[in-house]
Image (cartoon, grey):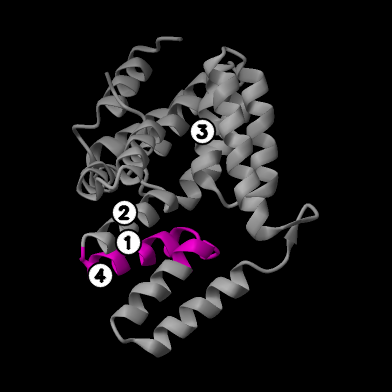
Amino acid sequence: MEVSSAQQLDRAKQHFELRDYHGAIHLLDELVHEGRAFADAHHLLGLSYHLVGQPQRALECFERALELNGKYVEAHVHRGVVLAELGREEEASASFENARASGGGERGGVPIHHAAKLANLHAALGDAYALAGAVNKAIEQYRVALELGPTFHDLRYKLGRYLLDAGRSLEAREELEQVVDARPGSSAAKSAYALSCYLSGDATTARSILEGLLSEHPDDVRARSYFHMVSRGVRV
């Protein structure tokens, strides 16, 4: 059974919490190599590499997380810690200053640093609703989460998937298009976006997206399945 990006990340977090950093690295590397990793996965991979004594690889991961989300406070902080340990004091100071600047301001009347935490809590509540079969309630929670964290495209991707589950394909398309624009290397996001296009009546765009994706990743099981469906004109 295929494991979703969120499930893979959750498994990696469990290994990390048990101090099995090599196990976390193994799972996170899979996400990265498959193009399914968002900023939080790169950040956790960086922490894991740092804790097994590979600071250069840790820095690469933190920097990738910051490419994806320039206001990722914890990535700035942990990057600064690693730089300081390497004796690169000026760069470390700049990274800590970036963390301070990124953590300033408010969003919806909530300090940004707290807004990020609350966004993840709303997302977790949304997942709980989804597990209970209340997908529309899950969608409501993810909407709130994205008001608090509009750049959290991992959450936006999950919102898009829940919208698809609820049969709200046009809304899903709007959300997933934003994820693809922000994360053009994510094959999971592209596949989901193609599905949303197809289900909302735009088979031409869906086919074009899937053809491009399969040219880059011919072994992508999800993309191949969707392409087969689109080619046959099957409705789901």
Q: What residue would you read off at disc 2?
A: 45
Q: CA distance from mark 4 to mark 2?
A: 11 Å
Q: CA distance from mark 3 to mark 2?
A: 21 Å
Q: CA distance from mark 2 to mark 1?
A: 6 Å
Mark in the foreground, 2 or 1: 2
Image coordinates of residue 161 in percent, x first then y, are 50, 27
Q: What residue would you read off at disc 3?
A: 158
Which of the marked residues, 4 or 1, is nearer the chain's N terminus? 4
Which residue does the image show at 59% across and 74% down from the upper left?
100
User: Which amino acid lies under the numbered mark 1 shown in the image of this protein?
Assistant: Cys
Q: What residue would you read off at disc 1?
A: 61
Mark in the foreground, 4 or 1: 4
Q: Which residues are magenta?
A: 53-76
Q: Is residue 109 magenta?
A: no
Give the side of residue 212 with respect to residue 69, left or right.
left
Residue 103 seen from this side: yes
Which residue does the image show at 25% across and 26% down from the upper left?
221
Residue 83: image tag = none
**Mark 3 in CB contact with mark 1 (< 8 angstroms):** no
Dot 3: within a 10 Å radius of its alpha carbon, few (fewer than 14), some, or many (20 or more) residues?
Answer: many
Q: CA distance from mark 4 to mark 3?
A: 31 Å
